[in-house]
Image: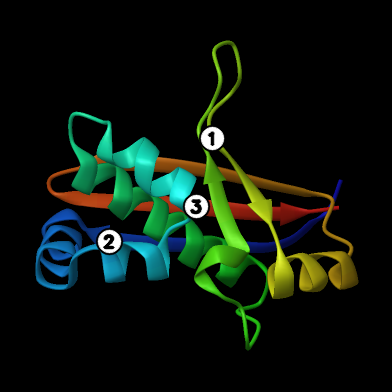
Amino acid sequence: MSVIGVGIDLCAVDRMRRAIERHGERFTRRIFTEQEAAYCMERGRPWESLAGRFAVKEATSKALGAPLGIGWHDVEVIPARSGEYGPTVVLRGVAQRVAQARGVRTMQISITHAAGMAAAVAVAST
């Protein structure tokens, strides 16, 4: 296995909360898939979960080399299931085409939250 790219991103939870309060569902639908939004809104701290997923989308794009044309829905965060190791991502559209062209076989992600911030790391590897 060889690492092809690494991405990291940081998102302020309060900034995410304000954006959604200001722009409502229009913002949520533009950035998150229906499944991502539903999962996060069911959580005890929805803004934290949304900020974490936003950070994953950015980190994943960076790990792929920040290709032009990548859309917000091209990276979808799938929650971990019982017994699995952390969340995963599904790549679609431009993200999927770039990953295939670069030989990416695995995209590993990690999300954390602390002190009003959400952070994510993505590692693209063969």
Left or right: where 18 falls relative to 11: left
Looking at the picture, tell me which residue is in the foreground, 44 or 110. 44
Q: Are marks 3 and 1 in contact (CB under 8 Å)?
A: no
Q: Earlier in the sequence, mark 1 or mark 2?
A: 2
Looking at the picture, tell me which residue is in the foreground, 40 or 15. 40
Badge 2 amino acid: Cys
**Residue position for label 2:** 11
Please identify, in this view, whether the residue under mark 3 or under mark 1 is nearer the observer. Answer: 1
Left or right: where 49 falls relative to 96: left
Residue 76 position within the rendered picture, expressed as x and y whole percent measured from the top left? 56, 53
Left or right: where 126 falls relative to 124: right
**Residue 17 image-quadrant placement:** bottom left
Badge 1 amino acid: Pro
Q: Which colouring convention does the figure follow?
A: rainbow
| 90 up-or-down from 42: above or below | below
Q: Which residue is at the far bottom? A: 68
**Residue position for label 1:** 87
Q: Name the residue at 47% across, 44% down.
A: 35
Residue 121 position within the rendered picture, expressed as x and y whole percent measured from the top left? 49, 52
**Residue 67 image-quadrant placement:** bottom right
Please identify, in this view, whether the residue under mark 3 or under mark 2 is nearer the observer. Answer: 2
Residue 109 position within the rendered picture, expressed as x and y whole percent measured from the top left? 56, 45
Q: Name the residue at 38% across, 64% down.
A: 29
**Residue position for label 3:** 121
Q: Earlier in the sequence, mark 3 or mark 1?
A: 1
- Distance of mark 3 from mark 2, alpha carbons? 12 Å
Secondary structure beneath disc 2? Answer: strand
- Res. 7 visible in picture: no
| Residue count near mark 2 (Cα–Cα under 10 Å), binned few <14, some 14–19, many ≥20 | many
Residue 123 position within the rendered picture, expressed as x and y whole percent measured from the top left? 64, 53
